[in-house]
Amino acid sequence: MIVRRYVVKDMPEAVVSIRKELGKDAVILSTKKIRVRKWLGLRWQTRIEVTAAAGSDIPLAQQVVMDRRNATGTDPVPPVQDENTRGLASDGMAFAASMRQAAAAYQSIENKREYQNVERSMDLSLVLQELAALKTLLAERREPELTASDTEGRTLEVSMQAYLEEEGIQRQHGKRWSQMVLNAYPHVSSLAEALPLLARVIISDLAELSQPAPIRKESRVVAFIGPTGVGKTTTIAKIAALHVLAGQRRVGLLTTDTFRIAAVQQLQTYAEILNVPLAVADGDDEVSEALAELEACDLILVDTAGRNFRKHEVIESTRRLLRSIEPDEVVLVLALTSKASDCRRVAELCKPLGVDKLVFTKLDETQSVGVIPDLVATFETPVACVTTGQNVPDDIDIISIEQLLSRWQGGEEDG
Ligand SMILES: Nc1nc2c(ncn2[C@@H]2O[C@H](COP(=O)(O)OP(=O)(O)OP(=O)(O)O)[C@@H](O)[C@H]2O)c(=O)[nH]1
Ligand SMILES: [Mg+2]
């Protein structure tokens, strides 16, 4: 027989702990009110000390509660302090009431009622959490057909999915990729072991799309679109600088961002440093004229104003703008510091505009890279490059998803 002592605020709390630790057949042997010191010993608070037991060698719970006698005559339960238990378990009434309270709370979770709307004390919400955990535990135990290794596999699957979700990967992919690891590597037993395998299955699942897709040699006009402040202009400056340094192509810059004060100035500064021409188009109707100014260039990088693509009119005006630019490639720039769900939404809204490639900026400001394979898989769009800081032209990488996911193997450093 196992005997445990609990110091709790009320009986529902005790019932939850006892059930969790000693099982559903545990019995309460004694209860008594005690006073404990709180707040660095400055205040006293009343608590209930509950002694419970579990094991095959104890009699029925009710008997024990009602009699409050040692069950076997040999068990080590301390003697019940009658003067303190009065009004609690001595007549079983208060205990029964507490049990009903706990059962009602349990039931309310079971029925998935919106308990947020019901006014509850902090204590009760703690009990509810405990009960929910207990319920999950019991539900898992209720599946006799699961073998130990099945259970292990499920736990690992849950850990993998939780990890991927935390990384910014939506559930549908997380589930599929975790399952692929378990199927392909049935002997894997820990998350640490599973992470490189997850990276491996993601890369094989993405196939060609996992390779970096820099601007194609044949592309002459490349337009960059994206939400405000994600780093479009800075990325364009970095890409322009790389091509200028490579010396293979005559680079020109075109900006259509006349919305923001100093936007033209920003690109003008880079153009001057790189010694490349800059054309400005103030509206769709000026685009062809601006492109004509850059006739001598064989790579034209087009900067656009950061927009809120959640607005229908923004999607429409971007569509008109792109139609006038007639780009060979459209690159959607997203910042890794944005919420994964927001990136996903923008990609979803922009994909119909003909997005060919993705660029992810601000890798230096985050540890999470999961949104990259997530979006690549969802939109079947490869990654042109990632950027890793504010320095032009250094902070840019044309990198594969395999290299990006190597971070999951504990190789990455903070900051
Ligand atoms: N940490 C970090 N900051 C970056 C990166 N790329 C750009 N930035 C910074 O992000 C800020 C916005 O960059 P811009 O290039 O002006 O962004 P944008 O998308 O052109 O902005 P709008 O044109 O206003 O929509 C600047 O402070 C950049 O220095 C990056 O990879 N890492
Ligand atoms: Mg800009």
Image (cartoon, rainbow, N blue to C red):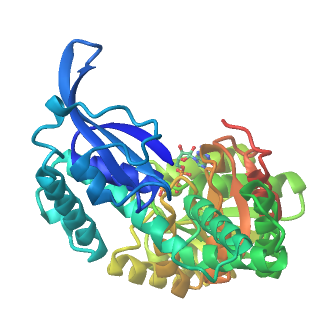
Residue 91 lies, in percent from the top left, at: 12, 49
Q: Is residue 343 left or right of residue 15?
A: right
Residue 246 lies, in percent from the top left, at: 89, 56
Q: Is residue 101 left or right of residue 256?
A: left
Q: Is residue 186 left or right of residue 133?
A: right
- At x 27% / y 45%, what residue is drawn? 68
Residue 221 lies, in percent from the top left, at: 69, 75
Instruction: Specify the quadrant of the image occupied by residue 47.
Output: top left
Instruction: Specify the quadrant of the image occupied by residue 218.
Output: bottom right
* Residue closest to the eye, 348 or 67: 67
Residue 392 seen in render: yes
Residue 126 seen in render: no
Q: Is residue 363 above or below residue 141?
A: above
Residue 27 lies, in percent from the top left, at: 36, 54
- At x 67% / y 53%, what residue is drawn? 237
* Residue closest to the eye, 399 or 415: 415
- At x 46% / y 51%, what residue is drawn? 21
Q: Is residue 100 above or below residue 81?
A: below
* Residue closest to the eye, 223 or 28: 28
